Image (tube, helix red, strand yellow):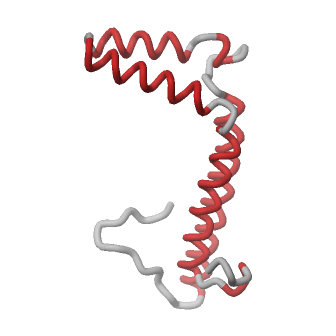
Amino acid sequence: MFGKRSETLDPIEAAIHLYASQNTQWQMVWKIRYGEVEQAMDEFERMARERDRAAAVEHLLARLGDPRHTRGTDIPFRLEAESFASIYWNNKDHYQEMIASLAHRGRRPVTAPGAMQPG
């Protein structure tokens, strides 16, 4: 798949490529602040195990509301969230176009039993 040009990929190969590229894009968006999030989650898990869960939740919520994370908004990590949201929605739109193209050509995409359908 990596040796093929994108226009020669079949729909399943293209979807796999989208998912893989989305992972790379996620890494680029979060690379600067990833450590902050991981540290907070490690602390949350430790507190939940060693003390009580309610205190761990309250501590995590307070940390997420810290101005260093909200940067003047009420949304923690807003810049990262908005950056990745545009990547996600673009990929979702592209995937739906591929599915519509298959339907237009009279082909059904192959899905595993019980798999969620796009939409």
Give the answer, above or below, for where 63 lies relative to 97: above
Kindly identify the residue that appears in the image at 60 percent across and 84 percent down: 10
Q: Is residue 14 above or below residue 44?
A: below
The N terminus appears in which quarter of the rendering? bottom right
**In the image, farthest residue toward the bottom:** 106
In which quarter of the view is residue 92 placed? bottom right
**Number of on-image labels:** 0
* Quarter of the image where one finds residue 117: bottom left
> Relative to residue 13, is residue 61 drawn left or right?
left
User: In this rendering, would 63 be left or right of 88?
Assistant: left
Give whichever of 90, 80 is nearer the camera: 80
User: Which quadrant holds residue 49?
Assistant: top left
Q: Position of residue 45 (x, y in %)?
A: 35, 24
Compared to 92, does 46 lie above or below?
above
Residue 20 percent across, percent down from the top left:
59, 63
Please give the name of the residue rendered at 30% of the width and 12% of the height, measured from the top-left corner. Answer: 54
Q: Residue at the spot x=72%, y=14% of the render?
A: 72
Residue 76, given in percent of the width and then of the height, sits at 61, 23
Residue found 50% across the figure and 60% down from its top: 119
Given residues 74 and 80, the one toward you in this image is 80
